Amino acid sequence: MMKKEITIQIPTGLEARPVAMLVQVASQYESEIHLESDGRTVNAKSIMGMMTLGLDTGEKVTVTADGVDEQEAVQNIEEYLSRTN
């Protein structure tokens, strides 16, 4: 299992379109992937779950991945959440 805290840098935060893109990124991997914020944990492959977090730019999330491709999954999710455009 791999865990990493990431600061969201996407200018609009995680509103509908960025959430849909994040779910697409997460869904490429076999690993189970979850995001945690303020004591709430959701499946990163679930659009509805991700929308409930309502995360803004500058907020921190903890990404947890467990599976055969966990390292690559966390790395690519970090790259996506760190995008500034």
Image (cartoon, rainbow, N blue to C red):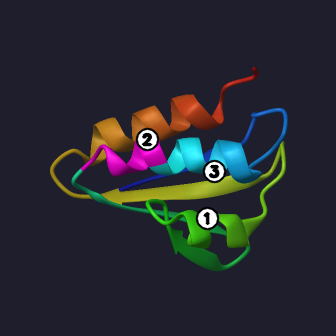
Task: Name which quarter of the figure residue 35 lies in.
Answer: bottom right
Residue occupying the far left of the picture: 68
Amino acid type of the residue tagged 1 in the rendering = Met
Task: Name which quarter of the figure residue 49 lies in.
Answer: bottom right
Task: Say whether marks 1 and 3 touch (CB < 8 Å).
Answer: yes
User: Which one is earlier in the sequence, the residue at label 1 or at label 3?
Assistant: 3
Residue 62 appears at what percent x and percent y? 57, 58
Q: Is residue 71 above or below residue 23?
A: above
Give, as a single range, the part of the protein colored magenta.
24-29
| Figure quadrant of the C terminus | top right
Q: Nearer the viewer, residue 36 or 3?
A: 36
Label the magenta part by its dominant secondary structure: helix
Q: Which mark is residue 25?
A: 2
| Figure quadrant of the N terminus | bottom left
Image position of 1 (left or right of 20): left
At x 62%, y 44%, the residue is 6
Q: Which residue is mark 1?
A: 50
Image position of 53 (left or right of 72): right
Image position of 60 (left or right of 6): right
Amino acid type of the residue tagged 2 in the rendering = Val
At x 21%, y 44%, the residue is 69
Q: Which mark is residue 19?
A: 3
Task: Give how far apart the Cα atoms at labels 1 and 2 are.
Answer: 13 Å
Few, some or many residues within 10 Å of mark 2 (<14, 14–19, 20+) = some
